[in-house]
Structures are given as structure tokens and as C-alpha cells.
Image: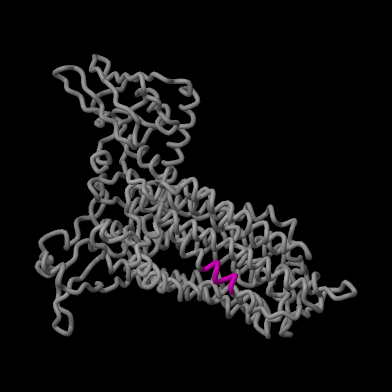
Amino acid sequence: MADEKSSSYRGVPGDEPVLHTVTHGLVTKPEARDVVQMMGEREAQAHIVEEGRPSAAGSGRALSSEDENDPDHPRPTTEELTSLRRVTDKLPLAAIFIVLTEFSERFTYYGLSGPFQNYIQFPYNPGTGEQTGAIDAGQQTATALTTFFQFFCYITPIFGAIIADQYLGKFRAITLFSGVYIVGLIILTLTSIPSAIHAGAALPGLIVSMIVIGFGTGGIKANVSPMVAEQYTRTKPFVKQNKKGEKVVVDPTITVNSIFNWFYWAINVGSLSAIATTTLERYVDFWPGYLMTLLMFILGTGVFILGRRTYRQVPPEGSIIVKAFRVIAVGVRRNRTHKATVAHTTTLSSPAHSPSLSADKSDEKAVVAVNKDDLSSSSEIVLGPNGITATTSTLKPTWLDYARPSLMTGEEARQFKVSWDDAFVSDLRRTLKACKVFLFYPVYWVCYSQITNNLLSQAATMNTGGVPNDIMNNIDPLALVVLIPIFDRGIYPGLRKVGINLKPIRRIFLGFVFAAFAMAYTAVVQHVIYNTGPNYDHPLVDNDGNATTTPNDITVALQVPSYLFIAISEIFASITGLEYAYTKAPESMKSIVMSLFLFTNAGGSILNFAFLPALYDPFIQYMYTIIACIMIATAFIFLYCFNHYDNDVSMGDTFVGRDEEEAGEVH
């Protein structure tokens, strides 16, 4: 599709915009910015490093030294590429600053959100070592508010990306949203002190801080990982001698991989902050934990600003997300007026505006070979004094095809303020096809979200042995740290050796199945809790109907398999789903993929609200059972709908984890 993507503007003559296209593999700024959202994805990393080259619009910076004949960085020969050991380049100082910033933000986010369920659900009982809260609103309200917070944090990154791309640039956007974040943290900290809780300020303060923090974290989340990718621009390997005198190949691809390994490490280490804040919650109070996160975030913001002179900053160039929404809106609108069209004839302004049409002027006729990702047939065109007339009796454009400039008159293109070309529409169409797999993910996120709220409430009804109940969901990231290398180095290679190649759709299916197992097992645990004294099917309520901090006599260790099943499901479903859509979608559409994936998380939060009425003892076990049944049904429906996608070569087959025989060498 390189030729298609390098085509010129096909819209209004004299009003040619700057197009952010991908030309012969050179990824321009807006596209490369979004490739990096899936950390550790090797194909994405290969494209990130291309960003140092000039864009199609000429807005990129000059070729870096490695793209010219640089005697200090000699290119490896073919023999050296195959025989020499590959090593990482020196990590840019700017990338280190940004990784530290990400650590502080994730430390803050997980540290403040970890105690939320208890903070909302239980009465205020500080410093006793017993179960404590602040608002005493019950499990239903606690789950509703934490679900809202998750939902809000997954829709705000869209706005953060648009603000950075369209107006501020990433550095200024991150700085702005960090200030917003700090305001939210101050509100949360001040309204969690004892006098504020007794005055009834805890609930309104929490709601306001959730909204403000949601804007802050969304704006940072949308821009920090793209920005770290922009700090390393070398695109070609080179040969050097290391300190031991060994001749090695410095590989940009594994250097970017190293940057994102550290970035992902920062996220996971930061997430462990909930261990500290939940312990402070139980044995001291909530406000010291929230104060700790505030101070950490201020420190991280200071580090980020301190590194400003080291950053490579890309100026805002317009949001591809906004452009995609405009294309969809135009396609829907024009489809309404052309819905009944079977035979289609259109006159274009000029042959120059439709370079995908190949015309032979000597015969005044030509055949248009339409790409399979474009319209689904060939057409005959006639050159006349009014331009090109394309006629076919079989052309049946889809609704999105009606957004193509080549199917508009010049007047229509001006009316809709067209700033895209046919290639952009083709890329968007292919992206939407790849992202169909996301349609089933909201149900999966319902299962996943249980570990952030309802499983914590379940742990509060069990014997924790003095360990805070809301420390339990840290089992999930700890399990991932252990399991991901096991799957990557052991299970997947072992399966390939015996002839079992788990392609993406099968992996996602297995992820859905493990999520269903997690919910089914959790339902069993809830049933056991209801059949154990002293409070049986009304935990934390004594025989007189009064609230008590005495849990049922059952160990919280029974919860561990639920978290392990969820962790395994993440490896199969969460990682693979985003990986699949990224590798199937064109490079110019990576930000659209991330936007749609984030919306599936938000969709899962919305579905969670449907289960709120079931959050009453003794009916909670049935809620888990219903979720498990819905999830297993969703898994098999998903497999039925998309099983053929694993063999759909028309969409490309570049997903990570495929056999190297199929893909060539993977570095």
C-alpha cells in the first residue's frame, strides 16, 4: 500500500492541506507518536525509530547522522549482521527522565485508587488495625464510584491526545495535565483528614477529586508513552567495539525495546505503591497515604520539567483522531443520500486529483484497477472536457467509501472541507475491520474490573491474618511479572516445538475462557463464604443486624486463584488483542486503534453498572455466576465470528509471536 499512501491530495484544487501520510515506509510524526502505545510490541518499535526521517509534508527534522555515511557509525555488512552479537545503544537521558515521570504517575494513581473501595464502603475506624473506611456508603455505592472512576480515566486520554496533537504538543500538554492532577490530589488529601471526614466533606471531596484526577491522568496517559518513543531517533544498526574489545552490532530495534522494558518496569513497580497506602490506611489513616502520593507526584513533575532541555519535542501537527471522526461523519452523511445507489457515476474535478485512476489519454479511456481495500470492483473511465467520468454497473460503495474525495465533486469536497485523500479512507476502513475484535472486549473488562472493587470487598469478609484486604489485588501485577517471562520463554516456544502455534484469535479466545474461569471460581469462593460462620450469608453483620468488623472464618488465601486466572487471561486477551489490531492496522492509524481499545475499557465500566443491583448479600454469588456464564458464551461467539481472521492474509500477518519461518528474522 506504499504507492497508495504516497498519492497526492484528491480534494479541492487550490486548497491542498498538509497531509500526514505514510510514504514508502517513512512514518510521519502523528503516526509514529501513537505506534508506541503498546509497549514491548516489536513491530511498533520498528516503526517508532523511523520517526527521525522527514515527513511527507516536510515537517520532520533533518536526516540523522546514521542515515548518511557516518564514519563514526559504520554500517554492518551482511556477514556482520548475521555473525556479530547485537547490543543496545546508550539510552537517551531524555528517555530516563520520562521513565521516572511515568513511575511517579503510576505510583500516584495506584496508590490513591488502591484504598478507594474501603474508603467509600466502610465506616471511619482509623488506627485500630481493624477494617476501616471513611464514607460508610456500602459495597454498591463503592463499586459504582470506583467503576465511574475507571470509566472516566479511560475516556479522557482521547481528549488529552487531541489537545496535545492539535494545540500544545506533548511536553506542554503533560505539564498542563500534571498541574490539573496535583489540584485533584490536594482536594483528595485535604478532604480525607479526620476533621473533614467528620464534617461530611469526604464524599463530595472524593467525587470532585475523581473528576479532576481523571482529567489529569488521561492527559498524561495519552502523551507520555509516545513522547518517550520520540527521544530515540537512530534508525539503522552500526558496528562498534565495546569496552572488552568485542565487535558488536548496535541495534536500534532492541534499543527501543530496552526503553520500553524500562518504561513497563516503571509502571509495574509504581503499581506496587498500593501496598504502602493500604497498609497506612489500616494502621494509621487514609490521609498519610494520599499525602504520600501527592508528594511523589510533585517530585515526578519536577523531574519531568527539569529534563525539558533534553527532550526532543515535536510541534503539534493536527489530530488524526479528529480527522478520522470527520471522515466517518462525512461517510455516514453522504451514505444517507446515496443509500439506494446501485449504478454509480461521478465526475471528478481533474485527473490530477485522482492519481489512483490510471488514464490513457491517447485512447481517452482507461480501466481503473481499484485496490481490494478500496472499492470492490473495476471501473471504466472516460476523459472529457469536464474531467474524468467513471462509470460502472457493479460499483456498490460502502458507507465509508462515500467519504472518498474521488467520489465527490469539487463542490462537495469544499462543502465538507475535505483534508484527506482516498488512501486515508482506505486505511481507516482497514483499521475498523481489524478492530472488530474489540467488540467483545467490554464483557472481558467486566471480569477484569472485579479485582479492583468487588474482590476487595469479598476479601474484607474473610480472615486476612492482619493483612489489609485491599492489598490483595497486588497479586495480579506480581503474577504478571512472573508469568510473562514463563509464557514468552517457555510455554509459547514449547507449544511451537510440538506443532501448536497459538495465533491471535485463539489466544484471545483462551483469555476470555480464563476470565470466565476466574469468575466461576470467585462464585464458588463466595458460596463457601456464605456457608461459613460466624456471620454466614450476611458477612460483617452480627446476629442482631449490627455492623461488625469480625469476618467469616475462612482464609483470604482462597482468593489467590481468582487473581492468577485473571493474570493469565491478561496475557492471552489483553496483550494479544491490542497487538493484533496494531499489527493489522496501517501505520497511520495506530492512534485510532488505541482510542477504540480505550473505549472498550470504558464500555466495560458501563456494563458494570448493570450488575450493581446484585451487590447485596446473599446474592453476590449469583452475580459472579452470571458474569462467568456471559463471559464463556462471549468467548465461543467470538471464536465463531473471528476464527477465520487468523488465516486472513488480506489483512497482513505481522503479529508478534508468529513463527519466524513465516515472518523472516525478528530482532
The residue that appears at 34% across and 51% down in the rendered structure is 31
Residue most toward the right?
544
Compared across the picture, whether 577 is left or right of 127 comes to: left
Using residue 100 as the reference point, say whether residue 61 is left or right of it: left
> Furthest residue to the top?
385
Asked if residue 43 is among those painted magenta in the image, a careful observer would answer no
Q: Which residue appears at 32% of the width and 44% of the height?
A: 20
Residue 210 rendering spot, x and y as whole percentages: 62, 62
Whether 82 is drawn above or below 533: the answer is: above
Q: Where residue 510 sits in the image (x, y, percent)?
A: 49, 60
Magenta-colored stretch includes residue 562: yes
The rendered magenta stretch, by its main secondary structure, is classed as helix
**In the rendered view of the protein, which quadrant contains the C terminus?**
bottom left
Q: Is residue 303 visible?
A: no
Q: How is the image coloured?
A: one colour
Look at the image and tell me in which quarter the N terminus lies: top left
Front-lying residue, 7 or 499: 499
Task: State left or right for residue 393 relative to residue 359.
Answer: right
Most distant residue in the front direction: 498
Image quadrant where residue 121 sits: bottom right
What range of the chain is rendered magenta? 561-567
Q: Quadrant of residue 604?
A: bottom right
Q: Nearer the viewer, residue 632 or 559?
A: 632
**Residue drawn 35% across and 30% down?**
376
Q: Give x and y (percent) for residue 322.
A: 44, 43
Front position in the image: 439 or 646: 646
